[in-house]
Structures are given as structure tokens and as C-alpha cells.
Amino acid sequence: MNGTGLTITLVPIALVVLMLRWQRPAWYWMTFGVVFAVVRVLVRYASVMDACGLTIPPSRFRLAAARIANRPAPGPRSPRILRLRPTRTGLIVRVKLRPGQDAFDFAAASDRLRHSFVMQNVTTREIRSGVIELRMTGYDVLKRVQMPARARGGGVMRVAVAMREDGEVYYRDYRQSPHALNIGATQSGKSVYQRNLVAGLATQDVALVGIDCKQGVELAPLARRFTALADNPDTADGLLAALVEHMAEVYQLIRREQRLSADIPDAKITADIWDLPAHLRPTPIVLVVDEVAELALFGTKDEEKRRDRIITALVRLAQLGRAAGIYLEICGQRFGSELGKGITMLRAQLTGRTAHRVNDETSASMAFGDVSSDAVLATIQIRTDRPGTAVAGESSGGWVRIRTPHLTLRRAVNIANSQAHRTPEIEALDAFRPVLPSLVKVPAPAVETAPAPA
């Protein structure tokens, strides 16, 4: 084949590759990108480690052996690659550290590694003593979020709600982080995150309780899957009081079934609902508060008394509700001390933190100021053209960027309606069960026909 024919053959292939990289980055990665990335990492590895200061000088024994053998002095040694595994979004490289190296050295050099290996993102985590894992993302997984099919079943009280920037699925695990705070400005994607959360919980055997003081515009369309729903502060006051009474009844049940006799093994002694026998275990409850500021604002003395009752009930549920199977998901645009007494005490009980785009640094500090200053900086850098992007973290200090896939309200309503048979009835909350309109089929529009000719 002559040069002209080879060029004619390669040009369409190059165009296809460029089109895939631009329009379908995931397909490009799985077909071409992963091969190029593996070659780059293996070829450049030693030089990149040396340039990033991640090598160690030769040992005295090696220097002495080189002098005795009259050979050139050995060069610095790079960490050894234990395993390199491609994934659907990038590469996972497991590295064995050399003596004297620390995992923090790799974490500090992650940005330099990203540029050196021409990857989208590089994160590090310690697997065990002396072994770290480099997670490299081959393309921007947060640009067009596509949840893998395996993420649909997250497990008991565990819901897949977003994609992490390292290509992994982000799960909201209520057994691990019972209560969480979700803040974000208008049009930041906070409501879509909440919608994905409700849609994920709708497929599990859990009671959903909602407080939406925007007259229910966010949660009322999903009411067929809610056991109780309040759309104004007055109803929310009574609903929270009923939840506190229900919590006390659950604790009485746990006390009766703790099985503290001497012949019962320690592993079977229960202190929460999850160790109870299945036929006695109460249904877990997830309380979703759409806009917490509406519960804390007041204008009259009576409203102030109502506000104090509401905040006190929320604090009690946050402090004591976990063992009784009551979990809180508190959402709002701001969540600071200006909302009055008791707010900071409530915030301290919310282990999970999710912050979407905010309008000022103070709002970001409300979520992560007591967790991580780096998370605060990452929150205020979220772009306005990427709704759904957020920073998720916990009180332990770890955090990660995530983005929620867009879920339309129509699709969320369909999911809630299809799972309406799972909606449990809780006697203490019967007074707050939403009134559901009957489903009416929309008639097809009439088609006008032309009169027959005479």
C-alpha cells in the first residue's frame, strides 16, 4: 500500500477517534484511551517518580557493591508497581512504598502525577502499611454522569445517589452516617439530589416522612410513597412531636427484647432495632426536611414557641433516633447560627455533609468549617454551569467531589407511584398521612374529522 492509500485509510480512523473523544468519552476510553494510558504510565513511570521527588537514593550496600565491582553508581529507586488494573473510567495502580516514604508524599504530588501521566484526575488512598493505591480517571466523569447498572442495588439503607470524581459510585449509607446535612443555593442541584435520594429509598422497605414548607411543591408529587407529610410549620410541629413519641415506644420495645439473661451470647444482646428479630423489628424511618430555615424563622411570640418546639424535637431525633431506626436528611440553603439557638447543636449531630454550589464562603463554612478547610475551598469553586456538582464529606475530615445524575420530577413520580405498595402504615403517624388524589387517566384529545362530501 502506497503512502497516499495509507493516509486515506488513517484519516477516517483519526476522525472517528476524535469524535469519540469529544462526544462519547466513555466509549473512547474503553476502546483507545485505556491502551494509550497504560503505555504512558509504564513508559514514563520511573522518570515521573524521579521528577516528582517520589524516589529514594540508593542504599549504602548498593553503593558499596558498585564500588567493589568497579561499576557506575546505581540511580535512585522508584516505588514498585504491584498491580495495574484498567476500569471503565480510568486506571488503578497499586504501589509498594520504599523505606522512608509516606502516603502523604503521593497525596501532595497527585496534581503533578495527573499532568505527568495526562490523566483527568489522580487520587490516592492507603491500602495498608507500605501499600497505596493511585486511582486515575481517564476522562471527566462528572461532565455527563452515567450511573453503572450495578449501582442500582446499594443494599439495606444504602442508596446510590451520585458519581464520585474518581469514577466510583457515591452511596448514601444511613447505617454508617445516620444523619446528614445537604445545603446549596437556588439552581445548584440540591433538589435533584434529594429527588434521587427519595427515588432510591422508594424501592426499599423503609418509611419516608417528609417536611416541605414550600406548600409541598417538592415532596407532595411523591406523596404516594410517603407515610407522613407536612407542608407547613404548624403541621411539622405536630409531626415531629409524633415522631418523638414513636421513638420512645421503639425504645421500650428494645428494652423488652434486649435478652440480657446469662445464657444469651453477647452478640445477640440488642441495643438498636437491627439486632431485633425480623418479625419484631420496627420499620426504619427516614425524615426528609426540604427547607430547614422555614422551620426556624418566626415573626410572633407564638411562632417563636413553635420554632423552639420544632428545633428541640429535631435535636432529640438527631441525638437519639439512630438506635430507634430514625434517620434525618436536613436540606436548606443556609444552616448557620443566625437561625437561632439549637441550630449549631443540631448541625453537630449531622455526620454526613453535602454542599452544592453556594453564594458565599460563609455558607460553605457552615457545612465544612468544622470538618476541612480544603472542602470549603472546593465548595466555593463549584461552577454555575454544572448543577448537581457537590462536595460530600463526613465529620472525620474526608471529602470528595460528586455529581448527581439529572432525574426529572416526572420520572421520580413514576418511581414513587410504582413503589406505593411498599408504603408502610405507622399508627403514631396516621394523622399526618398525605391525602392522595385518585389517579385519573387523561383522555386522548378529540380528533376532528372533516364532514363527508355531499
Image (cartoon, rainbow, N blue to C red):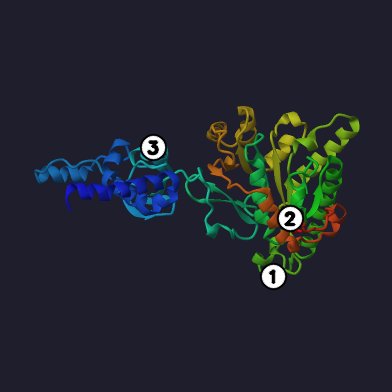
Task: Name the residue furthest left.
Answer: 70
For label 2, the SS is loop
Residue 17 drawn above or below residue 387 = below
Labels 2 & 3 near each other (Cβ < 8 A):
no
Label 3 vs label 1, nearer the camera: 3
Residue at x 72% of width, y 65% of height: 276
How far apart marks 3 and 1 lie (CA) works out to 53 Å
Residue annotated with mark 2 = 450
For label 1, the SS is loop
Q: Which mark is residue 264?
A: 1
- Of the numbered discs 2 and 3, the one sitting upstream in the chain is 3
Answer with the quarter of the image where residue 445 lies.
bottom right
Residue 129 in view of the camera: no
Residue annotated with mark 3 = 109
Quadrant including the C terminus:
bottom right
Mark 3: give few (<14), some (14-19) or many (20+) Cα within 10 Å.
Answer: some
